[in-house]
Every structure is written in structure tokens, then in C-alpha cells.
Image (spheres, rainbow, N blue to C red):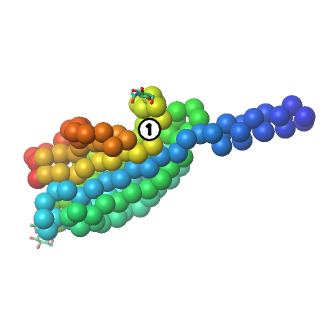
Amino acid sequence: MFRLTIILILLSVYTEQASGGSIFLYNQVRHGILMKVHCKSGDNDLGWHVRKFGGFYGFDFKDHILDKTLYWCNVWSGPNFSRNASFVAYEGKQYKNRSNWIRWSIRGDGIYESIDGATPWKFKYHWFGTPL
Ligand SMILES: *[C@@H]1O[C@H](CO)[C@@H](O)[C@H](O)[C@H]1NC(C)=O
Ligand SMILES: *[C@@H]1O[C@H](CO)[C@@H](O)[C@H](O)[C@H]1NC(C)=O
Ligand SMILES: *[C@@H]1O[C@H](CO)[C@@H](O)[C@H](O)[C@H]1NC(C)=O
């Protein structure tokens, strides 16, 4: 029992130290074009959100001590949201520094990423099918 208590205390200390982060998705597709997003992790379903051109959707998350944190997002855009893309928005083990500021720019030609404010933005994912 005593040992279990120690383990629980240690675990909570580690959990406290687990870093957090935030993810932002920017609608930079084109004037007048909406973006719909749906992000999920194993534990969280963040629902569907629609943003206008120039707007963004963002959320905070806690990183897992064992690098298990994984968020993926679907985005829809174009006529009747008929176009979509699906991508891993954050995977703990991909970022050595436990980066905490991940931005995704949703553009007509694809999905770009910037980690911790880095520029230029890096092209990372294509739209499913032809570009918008
Ligand atoms: C969008 O959906 C509506 C209703 O189904 C349809 O009438 C319209 O033609 C669609 N627009 C485009 C651009 O596909
Ligand atoms: C993405 O678009 C393709 C082609 O239209 C479609 O087959 C697929 O079901 C869509 N995926 C989602 C998640 O909407
Ligand atoms: C991680 O952080 C260190 C110290 O701030 C920095 O020197 C290094 O370039 C960073 N590595 C990556 C992959 O960002």
C-alpha cells in the first residue's frame, strides 16, 4: 500500500511536468471560402467547427509523458465542403522539443505547418483529389 502511494505520487509529479501545447488551424483557402474542421485524439473528440476565410480554430492539449499524444484532423472546404484532407496535427514523438505551438495553414494548394513560429511554412499535406 505504501509503495503504491509512492508510485501514485511520482506519477502525478510526472504528469504535472508533462508539457502541454496548442494547435491552430487557419483558413487561408481563399476569400469567401469556408473551412470545416474536426480534430480528435484517442481520448478527445473536439467536434466540428466552421471558420470563415482569415479565421482560425485552435485548442490546447496536454502532452502525454510517454509520447503517446496523437491528434489528427479532418478539414473540408470548397463547394458544399466536398473537398477534404486528413492529417496528423500533432504526434508527441515527432517533436523532440515537446513543441507547444503548432500551426496549420489550410490553403488552396494544400496544408502547411509552422512549429513554434518557424518560417517559412512547410508544405505537408495534399487535399484529397485535386487542389482547391
Ligand atoms: C451544393 O449542394 C446543393 C444541394 O445538394 C446543390 O443544389 C448545389 O448544386 C451544390 N453546389 C455545388 C457547387 O456543388
Ligand atoms: C473525402 O473526399 C473523398 C472524395 O470525395 C471521399 O471519398 C471521402 O469519403 C471524403 N472523406 C471524408 C472524411 O469526408
Ligand atoms: C530544441 O531546442 C534546443 C534548445 O532550445 C535547440 O537548440 C534545438 O535546435 C531545438 N531542436 C529542434 C529540433 O527544434
**Picture coordinates of residue 9, whole percent (x, y):** 78, 39
Q: Is residue 58 visible?
A: yes
The residue sitting at 30% across, 66% down in the picture is 50
**Picture coordinates of residue 62, whole percent (x, y):** 54, 46
**Picture coordinates of residue 79, whole percent (x, y):** 13, 64
- From the viewer's perspective, is residue 84 above or below residue 54? above
Q: Residue 13: name its quadrant.
A: top right
Q: Nearer the viewer, residue 32 or 114?
A: 114
The residue sitting at 55% across, 41% down in the picture is 19
Q: Residue 32: name its quadrant.
A: bottom left
Image quadrant, ligand 3: top left
Residue assigned mark 1: 99
Q: Nearer the viewer, residue 38 or 118?
A: 118
Q: Amino acid type of disc 1?
A: Ser
The residue sitting at 63% across, 39% down in the picture is 17
**Picture coordinates of residue 22, whole percent (x, y):** 44, 50
Q: Is residue 83 visible?
A: no
**Mark 1, residues whose alpha carbon is within 10 Å: few (<14), some, or many (≥20)?**
some
Please give left or right for residue 31 compared with residue 1 in the image: left
- From the viewer's perspective, is residue 78 above or below residue 69? below
- From the viewer's perspective, is residue 73 above or below residue 6? below
Q: Nearer the viewer, residue 53 or 37?
A: 53
Please give left or right for residue 115 compared with residue 69 in the image: left
How many dots with numbers? Answer: 1
Secondary structure of the residue carrying tag 1 is: loop
User: Is ligand 3 within 8 Å of the beta carbon of the residue shown at mark 1?
Assistant: yes
Q: Residue 119: name its quadrant.
A: top left
Please give left or right for residue 64 compared with residue 87 in the image: right
The residue sitting at 13% across, 65% down in the picture is 31
